[in-house]
Image: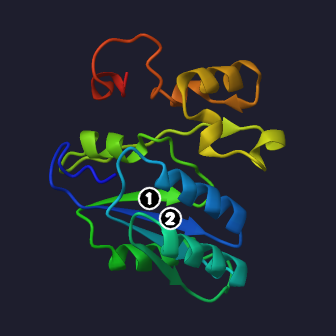
Amino acid sequence: MSCKFLVRNMLISIIMTTYNRPAALARVLDGLQRQTCYPDEVIVADDGSGDETRACIRRFQETGPFPLQHVWHADKGFRAAAIRNKAIARASGDYIISLDGDCIPERHFIADHRKLAETGFFYQGRQMLVSRARSAEFTIAHADTAWKKLKLLLSGQIGNGHHWPGCRFGRPGPRSAWMAS
């Protein structure tokens, strides 16, 4: 859903880097489609991937709830910064969120950015580290509730639990009031 009306009329662009990992890219794009608040556009900054990545992006362009652009350059070694800069130059958003092509966003990821955005400030996101054994099949649906996240943390399948304060666990007040605590 679009949520421009929630906080302010601010256009949000997601810049997502990728290189020859179409399965991971599909999970990240799926995570973006499951947001409580959609971005205004997503731009995939592709560091020279092949046809499988291009086909993955095309599938999401046809079915996605937001505009999806593909910015690509030839594979001449690791040049992620260069392709990210090209993607940023194409962005139309007032606010840019950089996302790696293997980081599945929590369902409030964009809404949290929208709430916390301030002129002149940088907001550092958070991550959940998924075990190597679990990462091949992991999707946002595996951790879309506080209970699921807690079960994964206690079983040792995820780590870095202090980086996912999106779970309330009984804390009072709106999420934005305690996100940085």
- Relative depth, front residue between 117 and 169: 169
| Residue tagged 1 | 98
Query: Callout 2: helix, strand or loop?
Result: strand
The answer to whether mark 2 and mark 1 are in CB contact below 8 A is yes
Indicate the amino acid at tag 1.
Ser
Quadrant of image for the C terminus:
top left
Give the CA separation, mark 2 to mark 1. Answer: 6 Å
Q: Quadrant of residue 7?
A: top left
Indicate the amino acid at tag 2.
Met
- Labels 2 and 1: the sequence-earlier one: 2
* Residue 60 position in % (x across, y down): 54, 70
Residue 20 visible at all? yes
**Disc 1: CA contacts within 10 A as few (<14), some (14-19) or many (>=20):** some
**Disc 2: CA contacts within 10 A as few (<14), some (14-19) or many (>=20):** many
The answer to whether residue 145 is left or right of residue 165 is right
Residue 81 visible at all? no
Which residue corresponds to the image point at 62% horizontal and 89% vertical from the top-left?
74
Which residue corresponds to the image point at 28% horizontal and 16% vertical from the top-left?
173
Task: Please identify the residue farthest to the right as the structure is shown.
Answer: 133
The answer to whether residue 181 is left or right of residue 22 is left
* Residue 77 position in % (x across, y down): 68, 80
* 149 lies above or below 42: above
| Residue tagged 2 | 16
Which residue corresponds to the image point at 71% horizontal and 67% vertical from the top-left?
21
* 157 lies above or below 62: above
